[in-house]
Amino acid sequence: MKKLLCLIAVIPALSFAQKDDSIFIRKLANEILVNGTAYENLRHLTKNIGGRLAGSPQMTMAENWGAAVLKQVGADTVIMQPCMVPHWVRGGTDKASITSVNSKRTRRPLDVVALGNTIGTGKKGVTAQVIAISSFDELERRKDEVKGKIVFYNAAFNPANVRPFTSYSEMSAYRTRGASRAAKYGAVATIVRSMSEGTNNHPHTGSNNYNDSFPKIPAIAIGLEDADHLWNVCKSNANVQVSVTTHGYFLPDAQAYNVIGELKGSGKDVTYLTVGGHLDSWDNCEGAHDDGAGIVQTMEILRAFKALGYKPKNTIRFVLFANEENGLRGGNKYAEEAKAKNEKHVFALESDAGGFTPRGFGFTIDAEKLRKIQPWVALLKPYGVYELSSGGGGADIGPLNRAFGTPLAGLQPDPQRYFDLHHARNDVFEAVNKRELLLGAINMAALVYLVDKHGL
Amino acid sequence: MKKLLCLIAVIPALSFAQKDDSIFIRKLANEILVNGTAYENLRHLTKNIGGRLAGSPQMTMAENWGAAVLKQVGADTVIMQPCMVPHWVRGGTDKASITSVNSKRTRRPLDVVALGNTIGTGKKGVTAQVIAISSFDELERRKDEVKGKIVFYNAAFNPANVRPFTSYSEMSAYRTRGASRAAKYGAVATIVRSMSEGTNNHPHTGSNNYNDSFPKIPAIAIGLEDADHLWNVCKSNANVQVSVTTHGYFLPDAQAYNVIGELKGSGKDVTYLTVGGHLDSWDNCEGAHDDGAGIVQTMEILRAFKALGYKPKNTIRFVLFANEENGLRGGNKYAEEAKAKNEKHVFALESDAGGFTPRGFGFTIDAEKLRKIQPWVALLKPYGVYELSSGGGGADIGPLNRAFGTPLAGLQPDPQRYFDLHHARNDVFEAVNKRELLLGAINMAALVYLVDKHGL
């Protein structure tokens, strides 16, 4: 493309009453686009600290860094809210390979990663015949064949789903519950097709949640190209053996912290408005989109508010949650403390769907309130958000809603690239675009400002 | 992010009359998402053919490949429409370095690329003092200092522009006209800050259009990190010398073709509806987003229509234009022939803004017609397009509008990443996301279907 396109967007008309809001949001946007530090903060978090699973030394580094940045960008107070977190350790390099096909020895390595919270195989690993199945229904039908075998769940994302989160919600049970469902029938390990439809072979980790009623067995995820290969090998051969080695174990729960920066409100009553993301990430990646983006966007909103001298009515809490990936202890603790102190929480916003170009916000709020705020679309559309829809929020702010009925919102970035890198080694700084990241922060800052000023 | 977000979008209500359209568009979407070949076609075009500047052997390969694919996916006829194109040759590896600072010799290489259509420096290159300026206004003020020097235009994109195309339209004159404007005052070469705000140092090429009133001088683009460096060196030192070597030259105009696949209409009168992109690309990249994406989306629409047995009213022309980047001879030829044959062209659609996730269509059409088609947003929104706005089309279909007043539309993908790679070495296959590419094709197919069925 060479010639200039003359782009005149049909921006929804602003009402007269919205003019001041429009001007302030433009100031926020300019401040963030011109002076924003979110991208450099993300570089530090991902490149100098890296993956930061709950309980790890990197997570402690991240907490200290997070507290320092929140202070530096102008928090009135920084609170380290203690919170015990699970401390799972991967323990080594996960491995798997196809070791024999119809009793003929071979050695075809597979690109795998152990699922979070899973046990180790022991040094010798687990070698067994594979039973390749495509659904839990098939597992139930063939349960008598499972004993002593490795169950391979090859349930692919439905490519016809326009929204990748739909595919994820349809398939993630194979990762979270597949191990115990197979162990029930005597399986010795499980392999799951990664929760992705990327065009590469990276394996994607994520939580495996054991059901205590059944033996705990090792569980790994496999890249998509290897999954297709293993499936084809199993479909054309009677006896395919795979060897799996994992090293996972739990240490005692570790001390961690929700890191909270406060910008004090001017209202008579102390009321809270929360905005945040989660500081922890899986250990096999830099956690750039999940959820480094949410963390640095949260910091950026505080920085921009301070730079513009914004004095909120509510006390705004900028929260770096401690443990979303394998426990949700951070979000639960935050709501527990709020309940114990009888705090009044009027709204909470989370960014935990990647640092991609923003498209909308999803709300957990009553329908009438959602209808009332639709005119805000006119204020956000110049910055990319065109939809305030029903359904959404975030894992870490969910407990606030359950405790107080607090209205929630979640940033909805464009979702198409998210599961290409979610929980995989390619979730790195380089996959985040600076302008997309900043535009997310602008829309979040604008929404926080609108809720603070006008209420819900 | 681990927990599932329950996403219930507020889709604009469909009218009863739109139900059939909604069903057909869903079929198009399923066909393209499940069976789409656009991504593999793009892999072939970018990896097996590569960069394909007008006049190059690669462009001839691309024409033959394009004709074969259009036949294969079901065109009733494939027309090779002859068209003479400029044949500029880069001629070697462009080089530049800072050779002395305040008469002290140094050798700091710069990452550069010659602008398209520029002359070579000769083997010895051009070595001269640099005058670093930030605007044409500054050039005019300092015109007496320019003679015998290399003019370095360091005009950066305005980071406060939310739409990168705005920045491009503000700054691209430094690339297209900067050489001749400096030559007017005796400059011996120009260096332009690349038309980008990416976070890397890749130099971006693109057309330099000489004004025949002034001497032709070599013109190169420089990566952003090097531009910042050179700017700082020039600001702190009185005499900075740079050496530039380029090798460009023109051969006689070459024979090329617009490659046109037709799907015959069932209407009594022969009327045409055009959809296309440009097959040529710059030579320093794979031309994946610019405009490989538009080419394979065009092919995909034809494939999907045939797969679903769609019988259009109008004859639909799927056009791979011959020469957008450095001449626009393809688009001009297409309109000329249409004029000569007195064809009736009812609509033309172009995809030439990248293969990123779709957001809207921009129209060149009268306001009342644009208002009338707004209900189509309800049909497109499930696939990502939420805006049918005024302004837009594309360089290659522009001549049709000027010849016949044909209404135009251009696909508007998310623009934030486009100028990170536009005309630079990182415009490669790997930068294109399969699902985003296919979603663009779905929305284009849906728009072509709606215009074909309902008219404008």
Image: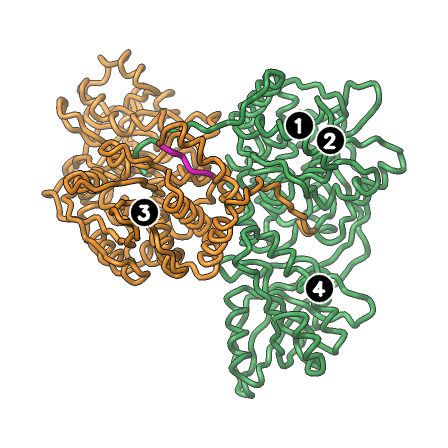
Chain colours: A green, B orange
Which of label 4 and label 3 is nearer to you?
A: 3
Which of label 4 and label 2 is nearer to you?
A: 2
Secondary structure beneath disc 3?
Answer: loop
Q: CA distance from mark 1 to mark 3?
A: 40 Å
The percent position of residue B170, horizontal first and vertical second, equals: 36, 24
Q: Chain of mark 4?
A: A
In contact (CB < 8 Å): disc 1 and disc 4: no
Give the residue type that dot 1 points to: Leu
In contact (CB < 8 Å): disc 2 and disc 1: yes
Residue at which label 4 appears: A248
- Label 1 or label 4, whichever comes before in sequence order: 4
Labels 1 and 4 share a subunit: yes
- A399 or B130, which is in the foreground? A399
Image quadrant where residue B132 sits = top left
Question: What stretch of residues is rendered in magenta?
Answer: B360-364
Q: CA distance from mark 2 to mark 1?
A: 9 Å
Labels 1 and 3 share a subunit: no
In contact (CB < 8 Å): disc 1 and disc 3: no
Give the residue type that dot 2 points to: Gly
Res. A302 mark = 1
- Label 2 or label 1, whichever comes before in sequence order: 2
Res. A261 mark = 2
